[in-house]
Amino acid sequence: MNDIFKSVEDLITQNLPDAKIKITDMTGTKDHLDILIISDAFKGKMIFEQHKIIMNILSERLKTDIHAVQLKTLTFEKALAAGII
Amino acid sequence: MNNPFSVIGGSAVEETNKSLPLEVRIKSLIESSPIFLFMKGSPQMPQCGFSANVVQILNSYNVSYNTFNILSDMDIREGVKAFSSWPTYPQLYLKGQLIGGSDIVTEMHKNGELKEILKLS
């Protein structure tokens, strides 16, 4: 697996141990990432709050090696209903 | 809302006084219209796909809103990120409250929430 993907994934799971993560390189340049995060930490939270959790975790990386992220946040229940897991 | 001179769609605004403290400058931009967007480029010429996406969504509701091109001012560009604790652009504000960036606006557009909150503006 790609280093940057692995380090981003590790960073998120350090903060959200139950998280299932899928990262896609959107541009081939490894700095525009599409990240799907499934975690029950999002349960009962509005989408802004859900993205905020991830943005806070990634904030230092977004100042350095990552330029943009596209986020999709789901609870396990929502992910099951959407057929993603 | 019945101002005959109001423009439907986005208007890029310029600051009138850059000597004020940064937080005052940021707040006066955000409060310059009920719907406000910090973006890369202008509504007529977005310089980033995510900014273009939010402009396109807002335009589909026939609302008027102000925008500021964060590429034109490094102090604002860095200052807003700290002000909102949100590390990326675009950033959409409704009545001074941060709603989110391109993904959140897209999802709220699809699930109908955006239509509801734009009515309040």
Image (cartoon, coloured by chain):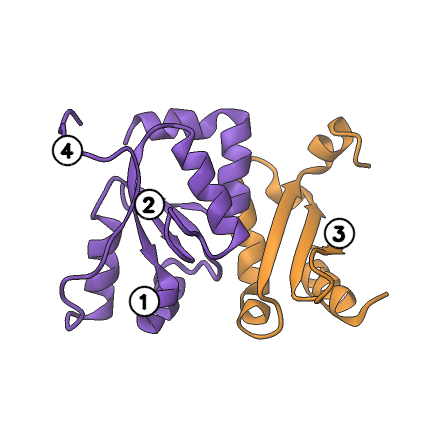
User: Is A73 left or right of A56, judged from the image as shown?
Assistant: right
Task: Classify mark 1: helix, strand or loop.
Answer: helix
Q: Colour of chain B?
A: purple
Q: Are marks 1 and 3 in contact (CB under 8 Å)?
A: no
Q: Nearer the viewer, residue B16 or A70?
A: B16
User: What residue would you read off at disc 3?
Assistant: A21
Q: Are marks 4 and 3 on the same chain?
A: no
Task: Classify mark 2: helix, strand or loop.
Answer: strand
Q: Residue at x 24, y 65 (%)?
A: B23
Q: Residue at x 79, y 36 (%)?
A: A84
Mark seen at residue B10:
none
Q: Amino acid at mark 1?
A: Ile
Q: Residue at x 24, y 53 (%)?
A: B13
Spatial CA distance of label 2 from label 1 is: 17 Å
User: What residue would you read off at disc 4?
Assistant: B5
Where the N terminus of chain B falls, by quadrant?
top left
Where the C terminus of chain B falls, by quadrant?
top left
Can residue A51 be spotted in the picture? yes
User: Residue B92, how many percent across, how many down?
Assistant: 39, 46
Can residue A46 be spotted in the picture? no
Q: Amino acid at mark 2?
A: Gln
Quarter of the figure with residue B60: top left
Mark seen at residue B97:
2
Q: Which numbered mark, 2 or 4, is in the foreground of this view? A: 4
Categorize mark 4 by other alpha carbons within 10 Å: few (<14), some (14-19), many (20+): few
Q: Residue at x 82, y 37 (%)?
A: A85
Q: Which numbered mark, 1 or 4, is in the foreground of this view? A: 4
Name which of mark 2 and mark 4 comes first in the sequence: 4
Spatial CA distance of label 1 from label 3 is: 33 Å
Q: Amino acid at mark 4?
A: Phe
Spatial CA distance of label 4 from label 3 is: 49 Å
